[in-house]
Amino acid sequence: MSDYRKVLYSVDEGVARITLNRPEKRNALDDETIAEIRRALAESAKGEAVRVVLITGAGTDFCAGADLAAIERLSRGTVIENVSDARQFGDLFLEMRRHPRPIIAAVRGRALAGGCGIATAADFVLAAESAQFGYPEIKIGFVPAMVMAILRRSVSEKRALELLATGEIIPASTALEIGMITRVFADAAFESEVLSYAAQLAARSSSALALTKSLFYQIDTVAFDAALSAGVQTNALARLTEDCRCGIQKFLKKS
């Protein structure tokens, strides 16, 4: 839409595409960019035609992380101002997790620091084989703080701490091996593979996907019995959806 300045937003065939659009800054994140990503997510959550959300970056990189010029300006501000600014980014991660549709991050080039956080906060992370991931904040005396909550849920404790403490930049193949991302595709076929993956998800039952995503993250930190109880409630609710009723009827007609 025309009132977006630093992201591009469009919907086509059930896929809402959010493109970080600051290629001259390697799609670095300032407060306006974060606000526009959040607005696009909210718009896609309400869009009846949207079945999948795809986040990409314009140019050669997915996202280089925070705009350090903006961080430097804020470093001269008050604690309250800095907490408020940081909370905007934290809220973005919460909104991605609570979004009713599956979110795919399609990563070309570098996904670093907060950019790596946005990528791995997505439900599915698809990477070109030449892509790179990492949290280099430690190298400038900064802390990869909010992204830590995502990384600890994706890889082993020891590997997560090593990535955070060393600032190591890893290739897509390593990120896949340690469980940080979902798939790696050849550079030449990346765009077509991403669209195929998104189309496959878009073809699934939207109600079943929404319930699956909600339950999956709901049981993230709860005890086993509480997770089973939540599963019972979701199981019962899923049976009552139109998608489930139609799906069962089609299966029974085939058998």
Image (cartoon, rainbow, N blue to C red):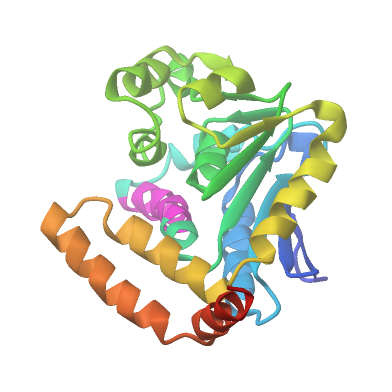
**239 or 139, nearer to the observer:** 239
- Residue 81 place in picture, x, y as percent: 38, 52
The picture quadrant where one finds residue 98 is bottom left
Indicate whether 110 appears above or below 235.
above
Report the side of 118 relative to 80 (left or right): right
**Does the magenta segment cover residue 90?**
yes
Count of numbered marks: 0
Looking at the figure, which quarter contains the N terminus?
A: bottom right
Q: Residue furthest front?
A: 255
Tell me what residue is drawn at x 31 percent, y 46 percent.
79
Our reading of the magenta stretch's main secondary structure is: helix
**209 or 166, nearer to the observer:** 209
Residue 20 can be seen, yes or no: no
Indicate whether 121 appears above or below 40.
above
**Does the magenta segment cover residue 1?**
no
User: Which residues are the magenta region?
Assistant: 80-93
Indicate whether 147 appears above or below 17.
above
Report the side of 94 relative to 222 (left or right): right
